Amino acid sequence: MRYRNLIVVALIVVSVSTAHAVILDSAPLGNPTGNQLTCRVVNVGANPATVVARLLNANGSNIATSTFPACNGTIPLPPHGTCTTSLSGSIFARCNVTSTSSKIRATLAVESGGVASVIVPVTK
């Protein structure tokens, strides 16, 4: 009986921790000119948040994960902090962000020399 109760408690804990993950996705953008696709993330909340920002191809496969520790889940993104995930070349991708906070906002942009020519929101 104790083992059964322990299993039930473990399943509840796993369900609750998974339920708090916030997943945001953008519409895909094409980058035929070979400029840079950049997923920009900001924490608009008052508390640090764990964030993993990735660029996914048309098949949903990860083609770029941020090298910024606060954007790849290594350390929390501080309040009002920002981070990016970028990839250059002729690609077609969408921005995917998973976070522990609902106070995360993001955009996906086609950029050249730091200037964005197309920007789309990353939403639930």
Image (cartoon, helix red, strand yellow):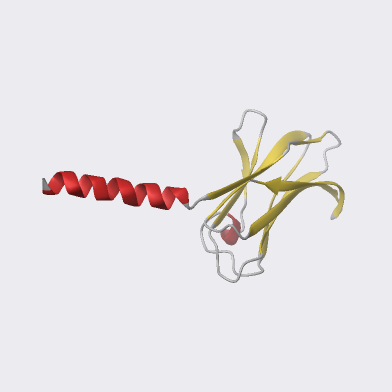
User: Residue shown at 63%/28% (left/top)?
Assistant: 59
Q: Is residue 15 left or right of residue 92?
A: left
Q: Is residue 10 above or below residue 29?
A: below
Residue sticking out furthest to the top: 59
For the image, the number of numbered tags is 0
Q: Residue 92's quadrant in the figure?
A: top right
Quadrant in which the C terminus appears? top right
Q: Observer-nearest residue: 76 or 87?
A: 76
Observer-nearest of 62 and 1: 1
Task: Looking at the picture, tell me which residue is in the foreground, 81 or 72.
Answer: 81
- Residue 6: give x, y in percent of width and height: 20, 49
Residue at 83% across / 43% down in the picture?
A: 35
Q: Is residue 55 left or right of residue 117?
A: left
Whole-percent x, y for residue 101 in the image: 55, 59
Residue 106, position in %: x, y?
70, 53
**Quadrant including the N terminus:** top left
Q: Is the residue 41 above or below the residue 95 in the image? A: below
Residue 60, image quadrant:
top right
Residue at left offset 83%, top offset 48%: 111
Residue 64 as seen in the image, left or right of residue 100: right
Residue found 82% across the figure and 38% down from its top: 34
User: Which residue appears farthest toward the left when viewing the image?
Assistant: 1
